[in-house]
């Protein structure tokens, strides 16, 4: 399923601001009246992406972030350098 297909089904609008070491995301989901604001810190360490300090304006998202923080604290990007190079370019 392509990005546009997903966007047309569940996302009304999406804004992503990425600065060195941090990202801010604003997303309005279909059927919702207010957007979700999410901020996080990230680091690209070799072939791993670390995500920390996830904060949202919705308590349930903060709860999910806390439950899964060990899983995304260090995400292996695999041995392929292509994804790592893409992320370095984006971040």
Image (cartoon, helix red, strand yellow):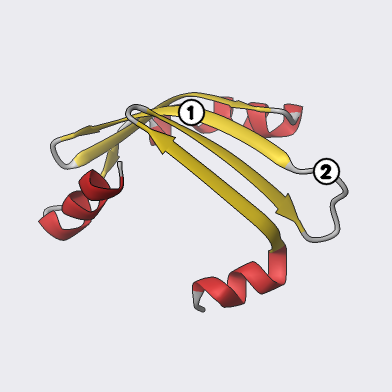
Residue 25: image x %, image y %?
Answer: 57, 40
* On screen, residue 34 above or below 6: above
Asked if the residues shown at circle 1 and circle 2 are in contact, with their CB atoms under 8 angstroms apart, the answer is no
Q: Is residue 67 left or right of residue 40?
A: right
* On screen, residue 16 above or below 86: above
Q: CA distance from mark 1 to mark 2?
A: 20 Å
Front-most of residues 7 and 15: 15
Find residue 58 and report its image quarter: top right
- Residue indicated by mark 2: 34
Tell me what residue is drawn at x 68 percent, y 73 percent. 8
Residue 85 in view of the camera: yes
* On screen, residue 27 above or below 24: below
Front-most of residues 23 and 1: 23
Q: Dot 1: what SS?
A: strand
Residue 84: image x %, image y %?
Answer: 19, 49
Residue 32: image x %, image y %?
Answer: 84, 52
Residue furthest toward the top? 53
Instruction: Kindly identify which numbered label has been placed on residue 40.
Output: 1
Q: Dot 2: what SS?
A: loop
Residue 67: image x %, image y %?
Answer: 56, 29
Q: Is residue 67 left or right of residue 42?
A: right
Figure label count: 2
């Amino acid at each position: 399923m392509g990005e546009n297909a997903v966007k047309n089904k569940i996302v009304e609008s999406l804004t992503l601001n990425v600065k060195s070491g941090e990202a801010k995301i604003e997303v309005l989901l279909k059927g919702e009246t207010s957007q979700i604001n999410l901020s996080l810190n990230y680091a690209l360490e070799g072939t791993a992406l670390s995500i920390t300090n996830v904060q949202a304006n919705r308590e349930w998202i903060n709860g999910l972030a806390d439950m899964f923080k060990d899983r995304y604290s260090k995400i292996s990007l695999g041995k392929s350098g292509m994804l790592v190079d893409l992320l370095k370019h984006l971040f």
